[in-house]
Image (cartoon, rainbow, N blue to C red):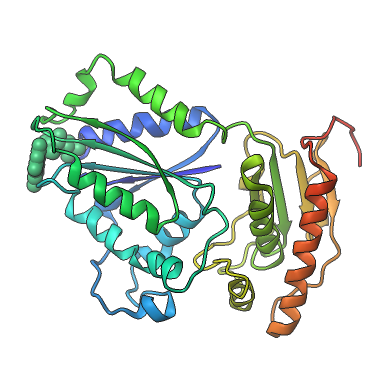
Amino acid sequence: MRAIGLLGSPRKKGNTDQLLSLFMDRLAGLGMETQTIDVCRRHIEPCKELTVCETKGTCPIDDDMHKEIYGLLRDADLVILASPVFFYGVSAQLKALIDRCQTLWARKHLLKLNDSRHNLRRGFLLSVGATGGKQLFDGIHLTAKYFFDAVAARYAGSLTYRHIEKRGQIMELPSLAEDVAAAADQLADGLAGRPKVIFACRENAGRSRMAAAFARIHAGDRLDVISAGSAPAAAVNPVMVAAMAEKGIDMGFSTPRLLDGALDGSPPAALVTMGCGEACPHLPGTLRLDWDLPDPAGKEIDFVRQVRDTIEEKVIDFLNQHPDLPPKQTGEL
Ligand SMILES: Cc1cc2nc3c(=O)[nH]c(=O)nc-3n(C[C@H](O)[C@H](O)[C@H](O)COP(=O)(O)O)c2cc1C
C-alpha cells in the first residue's frame, strides 16, 4: 500500500509541513509505504489550457508532473493533500499541481477510462489557517473534493486547524498527536494488514501490470495488489495501455517498479510470476505460482489483446481458487 503526501506550503518546518509529517509517520507506522512531494520545490507549470488532454488524455507540458507526479498519483492508495490557507484557497504552487490534474479528470470523465484503484483510493485533506472564521476552509474543501474526484480518490475526511500562524505553532496544540493518530488510523482502516499479492514479470511493463489491474478490479479491496519487475523497463508498453483502454481500464502514467522494493515489509501471501521466475527469491510461506504467458513486448495489438484476455481469465481463476489468502505456512511449493 502506498500513500503519497502533497505538501503545499512553501515554508520549511512550517505548520503544514509538520502536520503532514506527523500524518505520514503515522501511516508508515501502520505499514504503508509513504512518500511526500515537496510541491513548492518541484518544477510544475500551471495549466496553459492547451486542451490536448481533452482529446488525447495527455498534457504536452514537460515537467515533473509528467516525469513523476502523475505516476505517483496513479500508484497511490492514499492521497494526502496538505496546504495552508492562502486567501481562502490552497497555495499557488499546489493549485498549479491540482490544475494539471485536469489531464486525469479528462481521462476519467471525457475518455471514460478508470484506473484500477478507482474504487479503492482514498483522499484526505490537511489544512491550517491564521484566522478563525466559520468559512475559513470552505474554499479549500471544495477544491480538495474536486481534486480527489479527478485523481479517482474517494474524499475520506479532513483535519483543519484555525488560529495557527507562526512557524511551527501547530506543534503547541495539546490534542495534535491524538487527532492525527485517530484520523490516520481511520483513513487506513481496512487497508492496512490486507494480504499482499505480487504479480511479477521481468520488465513490469505488460503482463504483470495487466494481472495486477485485473486483480484489483475483481478482488476489490480484500487484497493489497502490487506489480513489479526483476529488471523494470523505463516505461510501460504503449500497446498494452491501448489494449487495456479498450476495456475502459486506464494504465496511462503507470511506472514499472523494482521487485526488490515490493518485497520490503511484510512477506506477500502470494507471488505470481510470468517470466521472471528464476530471478525471484524463495519466500517460505508464500504461495508461489508461475504462469506461462507469452511476452507481449513488441507485438501487435491483436496479440496483446489475446494475452490480456488470458490474463483476466487466469486472475479470476486465481481469485476463485484462493478466497482465503494468505495460505497456511506450507514451506516449499
Ligand atoms: C500569502 C498568504 C495568504 C494567507 N491567507 C490567509 C487567509 O486567507 N486566511 C487565513 O486564515 N490565513 C491566511 N494566511 C496565513 C497562513 O494560512 C498561516 O500562517 C498558516 O499557519 C501558514 O501555514 P504554513 O506554516 O504551513 O505555511 C496567509 C498567509 C500567506 C503567506
Judged from this view, the residue extending furthest toward the top is 174
Say which quadrant the C terminus sits in: top right
Image quarter of residue 299:
bottom right
**Residue at 52%, 30% in the rendered image:** 189
**Residue at 83%, 42% in the rendered image:** 287
Residue 258 point in image, percent of width and height: 62, 54
In the displayed structure, 239 sits above or below 236; it is: below
Q: Is residue 51 left or right of residue 245?
A: left
In the displayed structure, 115 sits above or below 85; it is: below
Camera sees residue 302: yes
Q: Nearer the viewer, residue 139 or 36?
A: 139
Which quadrant of the frame does ligand 1 lie within?
Answer: top left
Residue 259 point in image, percent of width and height: 66, 51
Q: Is residue 36 left or right of residue 313?
A: left
Residue 245 point in image, percent of width and height: 58, 73
Say which quadrant the N terminus sits in: top right
**Residue at 19%, 28% in the rendered image:** 168
Q: Nearer the viewer, residue 13 or 304?
A: 304
Q: Is residue 311 left or right of residue 83?
A: right
Q: Is residue 200 left or right of residue 158?
A: right
Q: Nearer the viewer, residue 285 or 279?
A: 285
Residue 252 point in image, percent of width and height: 52, 68
Q: Number of numbered discs present? A: 0
Image quarter of residue 205:
bottom right
**Residue at 16%, 25% in the rendered image:** 169
In the displayed structure, 172 sits above or below 292; it is: above
